[in-house]
Image (spheres, coloured by chain):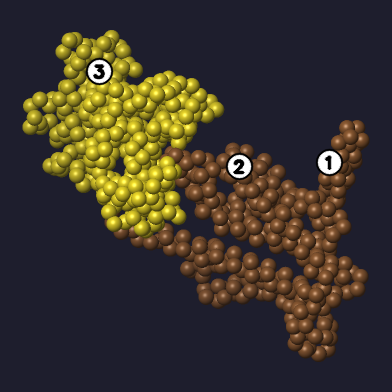
Amino acid sequence: MANKNAVEVKNLVKTYGDVYALNNVDLKIAEGEYFVLLGPSGGGKTTLLRSIGGFIRPDSGNVTIKGQNVDNLPPDKRPTSMVFQGFALFPHMSVLENIGYGLKLKSIEKEVIFTKVTKMMDLVGLTGLSKRMPHELSGGQQQRVQLARALILENDVLLLDEPLSALDAQLRKDMCIELKRLQKTVGITFVHVTHNQEEAMSVADRIAIIADGEMLEEGTPEEIYSNPKNKFTAEFIGEKNIFNGTVVSFNTKNITIDIGNDTIEILNQGYKIKKNQKVSLSIKSESIEIIKNQNKSDDKLKVAQIMGTISEITFLGQFIRYLVLLKNGQEIQVRSPKEVKNIKLNDKVSLKWKLEDFLLHQK
Amino acid sequence: MSLRDDFQPQWKLLLKWGWLSFAVFILMAPVFYTMYISFNELGFGAKYYIFTFQWYENVFSDKQLVNALGWTMLLALITLPIVIPFGLLSAKLYKQSTQKVWIIFVLLSPLFVPADILGSALLVFFKNLNKFFTFISDQTGIYMFETWFDLGIMSAVIGLIVYTLPYVFVVIMITMARYRPEQTEAARDLGASAWRAFWEIEFPQIRAGVFSACAFVVILTFNEYTRTSLLKGGFDTFTSVLISQMLNTGMSEESYAMASIVSLVAIIIVSVILIVTAVRTEQLEKLTRTVKEPN
């Protein structure tokens, strides 16, 4: 990965009345990186993207693109191209005219436009569709036209605002692979906004979690998923269970936390804590094993910890999800790739995990 | 909106269409009757009917009528290039603004003022404006503004702009409702200036509404009497000639012919707009129903 930053955002603030859409956001995106802004709807990620693109003027802070401050530049003067959520194709123009529009604005000759557009159409998989009108295209094809229209201008940064949200699940998966391939081929920086975790994990080199106008944390997909530092990230990413409790005791190896009617022991991974401190614990749903009654787990590293009652069993295709009601009234999710034998609703079960599967988040 | 309801009995649907047709017939009957008697050599109220084109031939030799028609068309042609851009900009402002209620109030308020009140108010306004400019001329010796707002073409056009602007605004605003502003953003992002984004991307998609608004302005100008008669000054418009003939000497047979011509033109224009709109709506609905091929 290159060392230079393609995009730098410093202390960006944007308010709408009393609401902070962006609250002192700092961000650095390296050149050639596929960077994803992930977060819940209304969290500020589209506002951040549009501030980079010049569609929104922030109240304070600044944006630089490849070292150049672009705060006073409108969208048509910035070295960015945008792919919009709702396709935004020009319905009265053919595919060829749509893709070539940016080049036409630069007064490039028709023959050159035709050659470039044809090459770009081959790159994105639209060969032979130059005369089609947008309404004659599928959702995936329309998205490819948008991509081609943006990429043909050879700008430094491509901004994608929830580009796959209008597509069905299978098409979305296929387009994720396509986007990743394109980004590797053209080599420019992509900044992609989504609220879909699977989409983010599929395409990103790095992910930033944006919520309530703040950037909570950033990292690689593996870091964000396996080792979230922030409680919100732990709740938002994957199916994680969150326990709120108080530190009862700790030593260099283990920490014991009271979660109300039960205690949980976890591995001390260098946390700085005190006795009676309020903390949150998170564990991935797939890291918990359900064992009927007091039977032993096949995995000796998994230790019986707490008891619960099966309150719901849901078949979700690739896995089965169990909801387990604990003594403290909390319901937690357990994801299993195969059906746990002889488990049915209202059965009393033990929940087991490895000590290091729990992460501690300090309040 | 369709009159059809899948659970509705057929006779109810027929009844609805029948009622609609009856309402249209009632509204258009006087117009059709005027057209009918315009072809009668013996004129209105005659016992017998002799078909003739004579009155239509006479229309174009009636200098007063032709003159009046010319003045009316001139008013329409001057009003059009002023009121259409005004209406277009107002509709764009409405779409972008958060203060929509105020914009609607300001732009539609002339519709709620009776024509004679509005005409009289403008008349008083122009009279006072002329007095003011006369005063300025006497004080400064600059006389170029003195006759600007004398009753004539200028005052009549201003009256027509005030009258037609609400209609233009509404027609264009309705057409603009279908237009998605992301397309303008996309055009700007690709390097288009604001003007090019409007002219090359937005206007092709709203021009049906703009042309409909133009047709409305022409029809309204031809139909307008009260405001224009108060503000026009010395020349005649088509409706002022028709009405003064009616009041003084009764309608001449040429007047029926002229009225029929104008009505027919208006009906054709409105029918074309309705048909084009219906066809376009059907096409758009077809597009949304079209099954897309796999990617």
Q: Chain of mark 2?
A: B
| x and y percentages locating residue A123 in the rendered image | 26, 46
Q: Which mark is residue B93?
A: 2
Which hue is chain A drawn in? yellow
Residue A64 shown left or right of residue B92 in the figure = left
Above or below — where is B85 with respect to A355? Answer: below
| x and y percentages locating residue A112 in the rendered image | 34, 47
Mark nearer the viewer, 2 or 1: 1
Q: Are marks 2 and 1 on the same chain?
A: yes
Asked whether residue A324 appears in the rendered view, the answer is: no
- Return the residue at label 1: B145
- Return the residue at label 3: A257
Q: Quadrant of the C terminus of chain A?
A: top left
Q: Tags 3 and 2 in contact by the CB under 8 Å rule?
A: no
Asked whether residue B200 appears in the rendered view, the answer is: yes
The amino acid at mark 3 is Ile
Q: Are marks 3 and 2 on the same chain?
A: no
Which hue is chain B drawn in? brown
Q: Quadrant of residue A49?
A: top left
Q: Residues within 10 Å of mark 2 (few under 14, many from 20)?
A: some
Distance between the Cα atoms at labels 3 and 2?
A: 60 Å
